Amino acid sequence: MSEATTTLPGPTARTMPLPARRALLVPVLLFGLLALLPLAVALGLPSHWLTLVTRAMIFAIAALSLDLILGVGGLVSFGHAAFVGIGAYATGIMITEGLAETLLILPVVLAVCGLFGLVTGYVSLRTRGVTFIMITLAFGQMVYFLAQALSAYGGDDGLTLYQRSTVLGFDAFRSRTGFFYIVLGVLLACYLLVRVIVASRFGRVLRAARENATRVSVTGFQVSQVRLVAYVISGLIAGLSGFLLANQTEFVSPAFMSWPRSGELIFMVVLGGVGSLHGAIIGALAFLFAEDILAGWTEHWKVIFGPMIVLFVLFTRGGLVGLMRKLGAGRDD
């Protein structure tokens, strides 16, 4: 009589724990709703929502890149907007010089952002805590003042672009709906890339180094090298958002890389939920929507928005993602 063999089921959606299923459901639902937005606009939703959400998704890419080093690596960078500005200026300068082809611009954007990240990261990561924050702030301000000094490209007044990038000679970015889906595709690709990085051995080392860098070093890992690679990858993704931002606004300004912009990116990450990845996207969307609504009420909207952010962070642990988890847990009780 042969023994019956028992086959253990694989980790399907039915066998996954409820929190894991919810964690997977939120980003799927988020990207699904974003993909349906142009249809909603066609059915009567205000058309400016398409432009607003496109802008929010561009900043979500930058916030997602920051979450990789802040939420996963525990590195608070106050100069992260410098990468966005570098990507935008590299795009704007090349378009101004008659090189509008995306396949030419993107390698330059990634190369310049990668080099800047490598040099500044090597210096900044030799420090910790407040010193790291101040050094990244100093590097960001250096790039900010450099952009102001570029008188040939607008200087402090910024640089107006009279065309958008082309793809193989086609004006692929001209259509608002087409550009929306391009940005959505880039956001999805960046999100999946960062998720793969975080789930990899590299990501686990980066997360462990956030908790106890000394213990990780003792096990044989080069913590400084892991953090530097994460810092450079983060800068590359942020530079990509700068490329998209320049194409949407058709204008490049030193304000793109100012320290208040870096602070806003940190707010977006904290607002959505530090370390949750999709929380950075939700935080960027919430930040831009709140900004748009309050700006429609009063020109002094920042006086209202600032305290709102502070109160939310103080009384809501885990940001919007944490709040959704609590509401979900409350329904199960």
Image (spheres, rainbow, N blue to C red):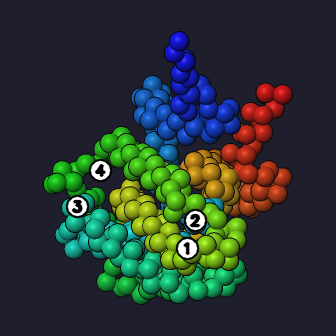
- Could you say which disc has been placed on residue 173 in the image? 4
Distance Cα–Cα, label 3 vs label 4: 14 Å
- Could you say which disc has been placed on residue 297 in the image? none
Residue beneath disc 3: 103
Q: Nearer the viewer, mark 2 or mark 3?
A: 2
Task: Look at label 1 and name its amino acid.
Answer: Phe
Confirm whether residue 78 shows in the render.
no
Q: Nearer the viewer, residue 30 or 9?
A: 9
Q: Residues within 10 Å of mark 3 (few under 14, many from 20)?
A: few
Q: Are marks 2 and 1 in contact (CB under 8 Å)?
A: yes
Task: Look at label 4 and name its amino acid.
Answer: Phe
Residue beneath disc 2: 205
- Classify residue 207 as left or right of residue 130: left
Q: Quadrant of residue 204?
A: bottom right
Q: Report x, y in % for residue 197.
A: 49, 57
Residue beneath disc 1: 221
Distance Cα–Cα, label 1 vs label 3: 36 Å
Q: Nearer the viewer, residue 172 or 237?
A: 237
Look at the numbered disc 4 and give the secondary structure of its residue: loop
